[in-house]
Amino acid sequence: MLHVRSIWNGAISFGLVSIPIKLVNATENHSISFRQIHTEDGGRIRYRKFCELEDREVGSQEIGKGYEDSDGTIIPITDEDLAGLPIPTAKTIEIVAFVPEDRIDPLQMDAAYYLQAGGAPAAKPYTLLREALKRSKKVAITKYALRGRERLGMLRVVGDAIAMHGLLWPDEVRAPEGVAPDADVTVRDKELDLADALMDTLGEVDLEDLHDEYREAVEEVVAAKAAGETPKEAPAPESGGGKVLDLMAALENSVRAARESRGEDAEVKELPPRKTSRSSPKDTGGKKSTSTAKKKTASSPRKSTSKTSQAEKKTTKSTAKKTAAKKAPAKKTTPRKRSA
């Protein structure tokens, strides 16, 4: 971590406690980048920056910032103008609140950084904040300025370090309006049971085992062409065009394929109903099927007849016992003589 170049230097404002820190990237981009070339001769295509007023190429030292107004007017903005902004987060990560981590919507998550203690004096307050976050089981909501704008952030503990996730402002997250299907779709219990079986078959995965297969394939193509060889042809995609004609058949085939890949029995048997709210007999929201109702109606006279006969027998026996008890005369008890 000490050899990673910092992208921002400042301090964490924790009440009246100031913690000098350095901001370093917590992630790496391993994607393969391409250059634009002239297809006829392989020459590199480069972009040059021209001033549209003087029609000449300008260097980076001559380029500044400007804000385009609604009428097209460009208003020059200098670094001194931005440095003089009266905001406390210009060089400070200001902690504004502590909240449970589940309060943060994952849609707000942005870039991730590590906060590195800025020298020996920062070790004690840095450790204090880290342990306080651990014990409270909360995350810190922060505000900070980076790359010309104020941003929202979240501090949490990762191992022995404090990490900061950049967060989008709440008004930058769009509502999911018009995304879900408009049609009124009914999903059957059997379809849900097969989906559950597919989820159980796929199971869990160790994220460390996942890798970028597309990047590896591109690297193989680059290596083959560099060696003057012909790259391997990709396997033809399966027919079907991604259209699901029979959902039940697709689910059953998916479960079968997943089980075969794991070396399990690929036979998809009739799945027992899961003990969930949708299949519980106590759930009165759904209507009972007609066939089930008919069966219960057909079998109910036999059960009621047998129950009635049993009840009549019990009533007859109890009545006979009561009658016998009334007719039988009470036995007189002879008092014992006391011995003199």
Image (cartoon, helix red, strand yellow):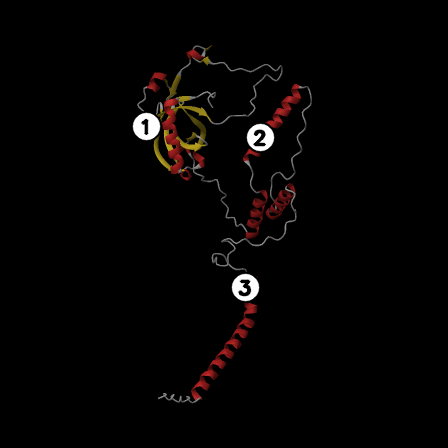
Q: How much space separates mark 2 and mark 1, taking CA atoms? A: 43 Å
Residue 258, how many percent across, how many down? Answer: 62, 42
Q: Which element type, helix, strand or loop, lies under badge 2?
A: loop
Tell which circle, 2 or 3, labels the residue nearer the N-terminal end.
2
- The reply to whether residue 78 is visible in this rendering is no
Q: Amino acid at mark 2?
A: Asp
Q: Which element type, helix, strand or loop, lies under badge 3?
A: helix
Tell which circle, 1 or 3, labels the residue nearer the N-terminal end.
1
Q: Residue at x 40, y 35 (%)?
A: 134
Q: Is residue 257 above or below residue 76?
A: below
* Mark 2 crowdedness (10 Å alpha carbons): few <14, some 14-19, many ≥20: few
Q: How much space separates mark 2 and mark 3, taking CA atoms? A: 55 Å
Q: Quadrant of residue 41?
A: top right
Q: Which element type, helix, strand or loop, lies under badge 1?
A: strand
Q: Quadrant of the C terminus?
A: bottom left
Residue 293: which numbered mark, if any? 3
Residue 182, how many percent across, how many down? Answer: 49, 44
